[in-house]
Amino acid sequence: MIIMHYRFTLPADYDMGIIEQRISLNGARLDGFPGLVAKAYLYACREDGVLNENRYAPLYFWREASGMQRFLQSPGFATLVRDFGWPIIESWLAFEEPTFTTNLAEARFMTLNRWTISPHTNLAALPVKAGFSAWDVTRWQGLTVNASQQRPASGPEVYRIGYLARGAAAADLRL
């Protein structure tokens, strides 16, 4: 499984209602998308005080690379690039199938925590942290994703979940 994430930092005075409306109008378009397990339409509002900036930051769970490729070559992604610019796309390989303590369909918030994999670490013994873990071997960075119904008091990247799209591969997993 591949985790894909990109984020757009928006101006401090940006009306985040525009992002909420965009999610409301377009979120379901990826329901049933081939190769997609789930897409969390994530966003953060400056006034929440957690990130101190406005962000639109979707997170994808792909079953395989071909689904990710199909999406990146789609008219939907072309529209996103037209509206927000060319994103830097991060990707991680999952350590295991995603399991969350909170059902994703019920979650309202998602926290992303990035951590460094030190040189010469025993990769077979990497800790699988609470939540869902993945790694990027080009940057030697781990990622832990947690979902919750209540806003976490703190965290490196805390986002609201505007919509959870379930792709065609969602039936393969327990989310």
Image (cartoon, grey):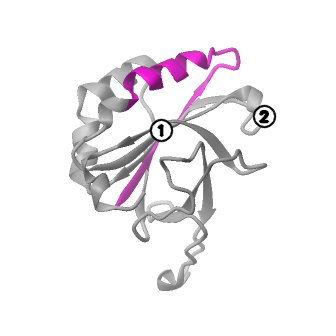
Residues in magenta?
Answer: 1-27
- Sequence order check, earlier mark of 2 and 1: 2
Amino acid at pointer 2: Gly
Amino acid type indicated by mark 1 = Pro
Name the residue at 72% across, 51% down: 155
Residue visible at 58% across and 77% down in the picture: 127
Can residue 24 be found in the magenta stretch? Answer: yes
Is residue 75 visible to the viewer in this orientation of the structure? Answer: yes
Would you say 103 lies left or right of 153 here? left
Q: Position of residue 26 (x, y in %)?
A: 38, 24
Which numbered disc covers residue 58? 1
Q: Residue at x 57, y 70 (%)?
A: 117
> Which one is nearer the viewer's eye here, 117 or 160?
160
For disc 2, the marked residue is 49
Residue 22 is inside the magenta segment: yes
- State the image coordinates of residue 113 (x, y, percent, origin top left): 62, 56
Name the element at disc 2.
Answer: loop
Q: Quadrant of the N terminus?
A: bottom left
Query: Dot 1: what SS?
Result: loop
Whether residue 70 is situated above or below residue 81 in the rendered picture: below
